[in-house]
Image: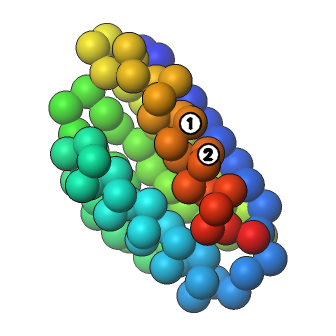
Amino acid sequence: MAGFRLTKPYTMSEEEVREAAEGLAASLERDHGVRAHWEDKMVRITGAGVNGQMSFHDGLIDVSVRLGLLASMFEPVLRSEVERYLDQHVS
């Protein structure tokens, strides 16, 4: 099973980081047809061939994604999209 993990430090307030994480989850839902389910400071992302989670704590946002065989073809695009979003919205 393919996948990736990204981490990014932040100095924003938890409220601002949660807003950014909600925006990323909404973008992934809209653009990739996945579903997002929040559990306190973590969101689980599931969809056809996609299983992941995103959490934020101790000044670090952590995104971990596992991809099935067919979805793994899109790993570079998905990774790039998540990196770009984090770079633009998390500081």
Q: Is 55 rendered above or below residue 40?
A: above
Label 1: element kind = helix
Q: Nearer the viewer, residue 67 or 31?
A: 31
Q: Which residue is mark 1?
A: 80
- CA gap, disc 2 and disc 1: 5 Å
Q: Name the image quarter holding residue 83.
A: top right
Left or right of 10? Residue 20 is: left
Q: Nearer the viewer, residue 18 or 30?
A: 30
Residue in view at x 35 percent, y 58 percent:
27
State the image coordinates of residue 38 (x, y, percent, origin top left): 35, 69
Amino acid under label 2?
A: Glu
Q: Name the image quarter holding residue 72.
A: top left
State yes or no: discs 2 and 1 in contact (Cβ < 8 Å): yes
Left or right of 18? Residue 10 is: right
State the image coordinates of residue 62 (x, y, percent, origin top left): 62, 53
Q: Name the image quarter holding residue 39.
A: bottom left
Decide: few, some or many residues near mark 1? Use Cα within 10 Å; few <14, some 14-19, many ≥20: few
Residue in view at x 70 percent, y 49 percent:
7
Left or right of 47? Residue 86 is: right
Q: Is 75 rendered above or below residue 61?
A: above
Residue 3 visible in this rendered orientation of the protein = no
State the image coordinates of residue 78 (x, y, percent, origin top left): 45, 34
Q: Nearer the viewer, residue 71 or 59?
A: 71
Q: Quadrant of the C terminus?
A: bottom right
Q: Which residue is mark 2?
A: 83
Decide: few, some or many residues near mark 2? Use Cα within 10 Å; few <14, some 14-19, many ≥20: some
Residue in view at x 19 percent, y 32 percent:
48
Residue 64 visible in this rendered orientation of the protein = yes
Q: Is 16 rendered above or below residue 67?
A: below
State the image coordinates of residue 77 (x, y, percent, origin top left): 47, 29
Identify the mark at residue 12; answer none if there is no mark.
none
Amino acid under label 1?
A: Ser
